[in-house]
Amino acid sequence: MDHSQSHSALTPAQEAAAGHEHTGPGWSVYWKVAVVLTLITVGEVWVYYIPAFVASRMFLPTLLTLSAVKFVIVVLFYMHLRYDSKLFRVLFTGPLIIACCTLMALLFLFGHLHLGHGG
Amino acid sequence: MSTATVSHHYSSTGLENRKIAIWAFIGSECMLFVSLISTYLIYKDRSVVGPYPHTPWTDPSTGHVYHAILNIPVTSASTFILLMSSLAMVLALSAVENKGKPQHNLGERILGNSKLWLFMTALLGLGFLGCQAYEFTSFVNEGLTIKTNLFGSTFFTLTGFHGAHVTAGVIWILTMLFIDFKRGLGPSDALNVDIMALYWHFVDVIWVAIFTLVYLIR
């Protein structure tokens, strides 16, 4: 059975339902997102050049958190995942979660991660 | 308001086929890049010989001192360039979606110029590729190739794959720009531009991860 249908002259409601969002954020949001992304990048590079901070235990979690925030902001606002269908979120986050779990497992197997009891 | 005929194909979910396809593709690409990043991280600090990414190394046979090879200022600049290209891309998509709407002032005319924003996106993408070409060339000149050590092999594979994706994205954008000059892009083309934009932003978010995991974390 053919599940596809052809439509012509779609209404805005149909377009939105199809995941083709026309009512997403505009310039006022986009430039603010760009400024936030730039400031986070500046922050990342700034902490990289502070030897005391690099040597501290906060260095790695700080950089990973800042990077994750940038990643999420781009996906939510520039890729419009915040405004799109839940199916797209599943299609993106599902493989991403599997991949990240595989990454953690591999790092553990190859001795880069420890469970906190020496070794 | 545009009266152009729009032809879309919907799946049984009520969602556009091609948009489902690009998200599924992006999901699979996530797995590809995380596997490459995993390989880089696993072999990090396991190179027998230098040059190394963050620390100097002296070749015992020649006494030649190799400096830490990563160039953070250049890579920071290229990261900024790629982030700005994502901004240009969302503005290009917005301009295509709103084509035909009345523009009352210069600001609206600039924001509504899809050719300008597609050109800016392609230009910034080329700028990023230029930075990567400069980086790769300087690494080779300093003695790091894909065959030198584990760091070189995993680094060039990961960043090379990303660069290839950026190159494909730039070609895609230039093709869309050509179409825009030839017949003009309008709301009926918004889905095609949206799919291209999703790919471009994906390339951007992968670089966000690479920049932190490869360049900044020691």
Image (cartoon, coloured by chain):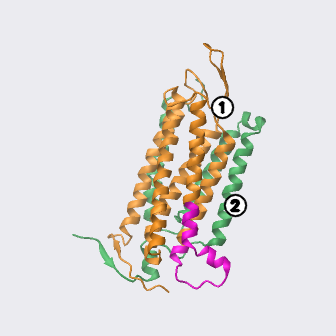
Residue occupying image coordinates x 36% and y 69%: B13
Q: Are marks 1 and 2 on the same chain?
A: no
Q: What's the colour of chain A in the image?
A: green
Q: For the residue marked with disc 1, what is the amino acid?
A: His
Residue of label 1: B54
Can the viewer see residue B202 in this picture?
Answer: yes
Q: Is residue B17 above or below residue B215?
A: below
Magenta stretch: includes residue B109: yes
**Inter-mark Cα distance, 1 to 2:** 29 Å
Which chain is indicated by disc 2? A
Q: What range is drawn magenta here? A: B95-121
Q: What's the colour of chain B in the image?
A: orange
Q: Which mark is residue A35?
A: 2
Neighbour tally class for label 2: few under 14, some 14-19, many 20 plus, Cα within 10 Å? few
Can the viewer see residue A19 in this picture?
Answer: no
Q: For the residue marked with disc 2, what is the amino acid?
A: Val
Which chain is indicated by disc 1? B
Q: Nearer the viewer, residue A31 or B82?
A: B82
Q: Is residue B123 left or right of residue B180?
A: right
Report helix, strand or loop for mark 1.
loop
The quarter of the image holding the N terminus of chain A is bottom left
Percent coordinates x, y for residue A3 in the rendering: 27, 71
Report helix, strand or loop for mark 2.
helix
Q: Principal SS element in the magenta part?
A: helix
